[in-house]
């Protein structure tokens, strides 16, 4: 997102405490005079001097591995962190964009998921620290819009992948890629029939960029509507890598959603947006990054 904003001619100030991220991901921007960085936990008090036109609140652990390890921090960033960023936008008269999640829908009873669906979320389950923090963040954002007149946008992001993810992230794409590159068994939770939809990062960023310039105040789904089973996805990575990895089936985690597919008609209608990058092309770019940056001894077939 920083790259896209800089390409569009904006000056960008990045804030991150690197709880789950890496400074390596912004190393290529260190000599850009329009990019500035402050190491900051947004749940702690801070001040930003000068003019601010837009505030993008994208902070949160996002993989089950991370938010299960940091449940309190995840709840804090969705509540206290969201409040701090909303106050920042209000103080500067800026627009505010919240990156929420498809996890707001929980394990859905409606398929595909449309923005008017209220969801099926376990408020006390192991995933609730993430699900409910994002749902609260959405409610808080709408409260600032209604009470204070703040110009807000809410994006509900579905599975996204691409370069700069961590191999040990715990999410399906880096997990399968790591295992395939090393010819280790590819771990599938459940029987592999549960479905996901995968959006390449450049498509997502384009959707976020369009949304932040729109007048839509209610949530908008951003993701790729192409639905496939987890097993099909594992086999696609096997094919691209030439891996001989076997598929290893493990028990399905508690509250793991059985289906995940966005209805993006709203984004198409309001933003003129839909994903453009084909799965094989996006996976090839992602595999190329991992094979060069993380596993230099491997190469994509």
Image (spheres, rainbow, N blue to C red):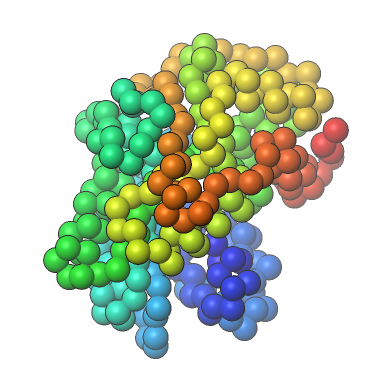
78, 220: nearer the viewer: 220
Please identify the quarter of the rendering in which residue 22 is found. Answer: bottom right
Q: Is residue 31 above or below residue 175?
A: below
> Which quadrant of the rendered structure holds the N terminus?
bottom right
Where is residue 241 shown, x and y percent of the image? 78, 30
- Does 248 sit above or below residue 104? above
Nearest to the observer: residue 263 or residue 228: 263
Residue for point 78% across, 18% down: 244
Spot the residue most to the left. Answer: 147
Q: Quadrant of the C terminus?
A: top right
**Position of 16 compared to 114: left or right?**
right
Residue 250 is at least partly visible in this image: no
Quick check: 129 left or right of 172?
left
x, y percent for residue 225: 52, 35
Picture residue at 61% right of the left edge, 14% below the top: 248
Between 5 and 58, the one lying in front of the other is 5
**Camera-side residue of 160 and 189:** 160
Residue 127 is left or right of residue 83, and the answer is right
Residue 92, percent from left and from top: 31, 81
Q: How many marks?
A: 0
Q: Is residue 233 visible?
A: yes
Q: Residue at x 52, y 15 (%)?
A: 193
User: Where is residue 176 drawn, in percent x and y?
Assistant: 64, 29
């Amino acid at each position: 997102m920083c790259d896209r904003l800089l390409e569009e001619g904006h000056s960008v100030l990045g804030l991150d405490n690197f709880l789950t991220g890496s400074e390596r991901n912004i190393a290529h921007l260190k000599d850009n005079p329009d990019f500035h960085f402050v190491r900051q936990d947004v749940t702690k008090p801070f001040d930003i001097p000068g003019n601010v036109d837009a505030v993008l609140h994208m902070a949160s652990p996002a993989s089950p591995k991370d938010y299960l390890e940091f449940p309190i921090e995840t709840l804090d960033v969705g509540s206290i962190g969201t409040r701090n960023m909303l106050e920042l936008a209000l103080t500067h008269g800026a627009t505010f964009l919240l990156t929420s999640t498809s996890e707001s829908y929980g394990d859905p009873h409606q398929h595909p998921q449309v923005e008017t669906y209220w969801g099926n979320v376990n408020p006390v389950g192991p995933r609730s620290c993430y699900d409910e923090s994002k749902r609260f963040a959405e409610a808080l954002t709408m409260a600032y819009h209604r009470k204070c007149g703040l110009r807000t946008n809410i994006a509900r992001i579905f599975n996204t992948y691409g370069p700069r993810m961590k191999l040990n992230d715990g999410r399906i794409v880096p997990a399968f890629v790591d295992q395939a590159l090393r010819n280790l068994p590819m771990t599938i939770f459940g029987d592999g029939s549960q479905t996901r939809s995968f959006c390449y990062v450049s498509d997502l960023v384009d959707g976020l960029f369009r949304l932040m310039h729109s007048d839509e105040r209610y949530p908008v789904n951003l993701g790729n509507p192409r639905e496939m089973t987890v097993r099909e996805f594992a086999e696609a990575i096997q094919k691209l890598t030439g891996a001989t990895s076997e598929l290893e089936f493990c028990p399905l985690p508690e509250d793991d959603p059985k289906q995940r597919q966005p209805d993006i008609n709203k984004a198409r209608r309001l933003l003129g947006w839909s994903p453009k990058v084909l799965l094989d092309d996006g996976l090839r770019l992602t595999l190329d990054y991992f094979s060069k940056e993380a596993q230099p001894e491997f190469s994509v077939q």
